[in-house]
Structure formats: C-alpha cells, structure tokens
Image (cartoon, helix red, strand yellow):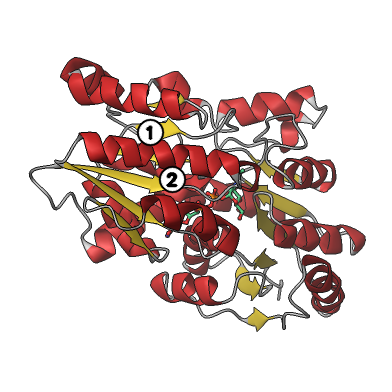
Amino acid sequence: MLTKPKILIVCGTRPEIIKLAPIYHFLRTQTWCEVQWLHTGQHQEMAEQILACFDITPDIVLSRAGSSLSEFSIGCRQQLDVVMESNTWSAVIVQGDTESAFLGGLSAFYQRIPIAHVEAGLRTYDLTRPFPEEGLRQMLSRITYFHFPPTEGGKNALIKEAIPVKNIYVTGNTVVDAQKWVIKKYNIHKAITSGRNILVTMHRRENWGSDIEEACMAIASLAKTHADLKVIFPVHLNPIVQKSVDPILGGLANVTLTRPFGYLEMQQAIANAWLILTDSGGIQEEAPTFHVPVLVLRKETERPEAVHAGCAKIIGTSGAAIIDEVNALWKDAGLYESMKPSSNPFGDGHASERISEVLKSQLSH
Ligand SMILES: CC(=O)N[C@@H]1[C@@H](OP(=O)(O)OP(=O)(O)OC[C@H]2O[C@@H](n3ccc(=O)[nH]c3=O)[C@H](O)[C@@H]2O)O[C@H](CO)[C@@H](O)[C@@H]1O
C-alpha cells in the first residue's frame, strides 16, 4: 500500500497561526495527505488564544528555552532537528518572516525536506525595515522549494531574484481565508450604525520611541478637536510601546486604550471602524474585507496592493501628516468614499485550496 505524503506545519507567532490555520483545516479534509501542526512556542499566551479560536490542538509543542531570542532560537533549532529526523516528512510548510518560520525552514533544508513558503515574495529591499523580517524572508526564499506568493507582485519579486518560475504559484493571501472562516463561524459584521471609530495599532520596532510618540500626540490632538470621534487603541504588550502610548493617550475621554484584542475582537473592531491607522502588516490585509480604508503609519510597505487599489495610503508617522490626512477624510465624504475598498486586493478566500492542489499534484504519486 502506498503511504500518504506527510506534511508538517511549523509556526510559533500569532500572525503565522492566523495565516496557516486555514491551510491546516483544508489539508485535514483531504484524503491524499496527513498533516501535523508544530508550535515552536515563540509566542505563548497570545498563541494559545489564537489556536483555541481556530480549533487547533498542536500535534507537537516545543518547549521554549529561555526568554531571549538567541536562547529561544538555539533550543528551537535543536528540537526541530529531532522532529525533522524522526519522520519521513514530504514537505514542511512555513509562513512569512519570523524566527520560527526561518528556523523551521533551515531545519527542513538540512534534512533535504522540501520547504513550502506561504506568503513568499514580500519585499521592501531594506534590510533595516522591517528588521529582522526582511532578512529572514529573503533568506527563506533562497532555500524554499514551493513558493506561494499571495499576489503577482510577490511572484515578480521572486522571478527577479532568479527563483525558477516553475516553483512559484500565486495563491492569494490565506489571511482572507482565515477571516472568512471566523466571519462565518462567529457571525462578525459591522455592529454600529452611527459615529466614527478610528482603530489604531502601532508596534513595529522601527517605530519604537519618538515615532510612536509623535503619532500619539497627533492622535490626541485629533481626539480633542473632534469630540464625536472615538479612538480605539489595543496597545501591544511590549513595555517599550506601552511607555510611549499610555502617558500621551491615557485619560482622554474619547480614547480607549486596551490590552491587545483577541482575534475575534480585532475582526469586530475592524468591521466597526470608520478608518484604521496602523503599522501592522496583517491589519493592512484584513481591513479591505470589511471595506475600511487604512492610513499606514510607516515609510514603506511590502504590501503595496492596497495602496495601488486606492484603499490604503502610506503616510509615515509625522504628526502633521496624520492630522492632515485624517482631517481631509473627516471633511470630504467623496474622498472617503473613494478610499473605501469594494473587494480585498490580497485574496479571495480560496488560497488554502490552491496551496493544497499544488502540493497534491507535486507530492502524491
Ligand atoms: C513587516 C510585517 O508587516 N510583518 C508582519 C508582522 O505581522 P503584523 O504586523 O501583521 O502583526 P500584528 O499587527 O501583530 O497583526 C497580526 C494579526 O494579529 C491580529 N491582531 C493584532 C492586534 C491585536 O491586538 N489583536 C489581533 O488579533 C491582527 O488582526 C492580525 O491578523 O509580523 C509577522 C510575524 O510576526 C509577519 O509574518 C508579517 O509579515
């Protein structure tokens, strides 16, 4: 009897779990393969919550060695090697640009197991922005076999980097598959009929310190000017971020600072938002599903599709730019309508099926 291809999904952070969950569930419905989920432990509390939300019980959980990134990496790599050697894996799936994704890929590479890289080809070509993600995703592309860019832009970047075109498959972003799953399961839809909510998130390392503070001062000024504006800001648990945000925005009547949202709460907050100000990658991709425009609080984005579609604008973190851009949308209903996306340029909700089809045709005999 022929044995089924065995696929290992390796991941460890909140965004990776969100983006790999739909692939895991789709592959579990398939009879041609067996799939296992490995959690590296890079994120712990945040990961548990997201795993529960997506009904995932990992088959393998690594124990986190130490609290520093280097201690985590060394322990993770050692444990990954044992897992890679212990079974005859046909492919290892990783996503994006985290330490977990890179280590999962590297360990598979040494065992000569083909790597399938989900969300491949995102680039800024500035190794310092975002750091370290740009470096990690570029290195992963060198050792990956199946490249799954979400869009044509990612495919073109990979082709320019001499990745064989036969190994590149444009799939759409699985983040939209994940949204469709939770929207249906938990019945998420816009639940406010009046007022204007601005959802804010900022956590990127390159914005730490004065950039976050300047953005917060601009948001405070907007909140004071527009009493009917409601700002909702789930603040990242990193104390560096909290130290910048809390003193400037805490205590304003129409600004709500909260702990990080659970994934469902976040989807509900996006659905309810009139506008989003963010430096998050995932939220740029999720907002169009709920027809919400985004102002990107960064100097660049590796996700230009929403900018090209007109539903996102890169504005940086200067206070003047934030105030001007929000006021322009506040006053000009036509401008606001022109930025409201009618569909999501990052995906159609069927990326997982496409990824499964490619793996089926290449791995099953
Ligand atoms: C440079 C860059 O862009 N890199 C990205 C970055 O990820 P990111 O910037 O997208 O990260 P977040 O902003 O954390 O959002 C992620 C998800 O979390 C949800 N969320 C958020 C706040 C909250 O309070 N509650 C939530 O539920 C939110 O809706 C979204 O789905 O790092 C990842 C590796 O870590 C990379 O793979 C990814 O390329």
Mark number for residue 283?
2
Q: Which residue is mark 1?
A: 294
In screen coordinates, is 329 left or right of 15? left
The response on whether ligand 1 sits within 8 Å of label 2 is yes
Is residue 186 among what the camera can see? yes
Q: Nearer the viewer, residue 322 or 132?
A: 322
Quadrant housing residue 339: top left
User: Where residue 312 appears, x then y in whole percent?
Assistant: 41, 27
Q: Amino acid at mark 2?
A: Ile
What residue is rendered at 40% in x and 29% in y? Answer: 322
- What residue type is disc 1 on? Val
Q: Is residue 347 visible?
A: no
Task: Describe the element under mark 2 as helix, strand or loop.
Answer: helix
Q: Quadrant of the C terminus?
A: bottom right
- Where residue 118 appears, x then y in whole percent? 62, 48
Which class describes the residues within 10 Å of circle 1: few (<14), some (14-19), or many (20+)? many
For this view, does 247 lie left or right of residue 257? right
Numbered circles on residues, count: 2
Crowdedness near tag 2: few (<14), some (14–19) or many (≥20) residues, C-alpha within 10 Å: some
